[in-house]
Image (cartoon, rainbow, N blue to C red):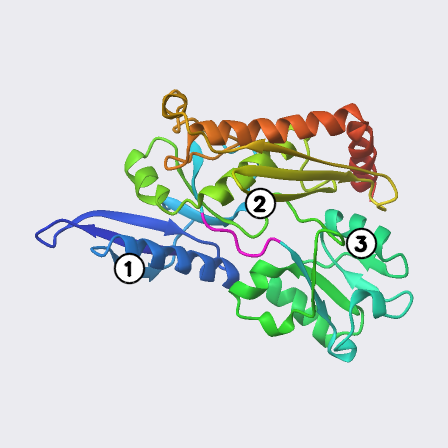
Amino acid sequence: FYVFVCLQDEEGKVSRVIRIGTRKSQLARIQTDSVAEKLKELYPDVLLEIGKISVHSVVDLVVHSLKDLPTILPVGFTIGAVLKRESPYDAVVLHPKNAGKSLDLLPNKSVIGTSSLRRAAQLKKRFPHLEFKDIRGNLNTRLKKLDENSDFSAIILAAAGLRRMGWDSRISQILGPEDCMYAVGQGALAIEVRASDQDILEMVSVLHDPDTVLRCIAERAFLRHLEGGCSVPVAVHTEVKNSQLYLTGAVYSLDGSDSLKDTMQTTVSSDNQEEQEKVDEKVQRVGVTALKVSGAAQDAAEKLGVDLANLLLSKGAKEILTVARQLNDAR
């Protein structure tokens, strides 16, 4: 699918057609439409038209869940905007028969569905009386599997996706960082563009949320330096408070029995204007180009992620992740 965005000049003639690509899932479409609406508000001369796109069509920008994007993008592409983060936390969705319960109140050996090694590793340690099994598919598919069978007592999903779908009522419990830290970039939408397309980069850069950008650059730098990915359990928690960026990062064995976790912080605001101007905002940092965010702050956020990764690596994180990767590959 794509959304046509037609830019018009002063005489009302179409000066450029901007194509926004999206996947066909309901959530992808909702997320893309929300970005298209924001662009329409910011650029009132824009016309929207929705249609299908073939694999051979060229698009100018694509809306993604940031957590799905690798920390190294294909050559020629960049993340031109990171929007204000929705809740980054995970949510428990209970089978209707368990309404009103929480994970700690579910009976022994209750089966919890999750496709995430990160969630399973943390929750196995936190709730040892529960069992965790894989559940695949998009949000609609997973909810259907939960509701129509008795295989699962509950499933774990990202709260942000449920809320964007308008399914807040299905959220039985939000898992805070003491129960389950979240995935890198979780809850944030990203707009991927061609790195060379300055017009589009400039256009979408107004959608950047500075705090979200800095948090996600730190998270992505942490993950990249650990050489982590979907095949290993890596989790984070970030916060910007009083010009300080706090990053907590952790790595886990598959069963959660072995883990390393630590927190570091850095200053992300500079009162020194000369210092700010020395740093190039156009530089891509872990796949993100943030034109409207202080370059010095972006550098500090990236360094924070690398420093925390190095701290955990010095304590044995590589060994934990190597074993986790090997066990996962062998499954």
The first of marks 3 and 1 along the sequence is 1
Q: Is residue 60 visible?
A: no
Stretch of the chain drawn in magenta: 83-88
Mark 3 to mark 2 CA distance (whole Å): 20 Å
Q: Please name the amino acid that badge 2 sits on.
A: Gly
Residue 295 x %, y %: 43, 29
- In the displayed structure, 200 sits above or below 160; it is above
Q: Please name the amino acid that badge 1 sits on.
A: Leu
Q: Quadrant of the N terminus?
A: bottom left
Q: Please name the amino acid that badge 3 sits on.
A: Leu
Crowd band around label 1 with a 10 angstrom C-alpha radius: few (<14), some (14–19), many (20+): some
Q: Secondary structure at mark 2?
A: loop
Q: Residue at x 31, y 40 (%)?
A: 200
> For mark 1, what is the residue?
48
Tell whether position 300 is magenta: no
- In the displayed structure, 150 sits above or below 40; it is below
Residue 221 x %, y %: 59, 31
Q: Secondary structure at mark 1?
A: strand
- In the shown orientation, is residue 309 left or right of residue 75? right
Please state which of the two labelled residues, at mark 2 or mark 1, is closer to the viewer: 2
Mark 3 to mark 1 CA distance (whole Å): 44 Å
The first of marks 2 and 1 along the sequence is 1
> For mark 3, what is the residue?
123
- In the displayed structure, 142 sits above or below 18; it is below
- In the shown orientation, is residue 237 left or right of residue 287? right
Nearest the camera: 85 or 81? 85
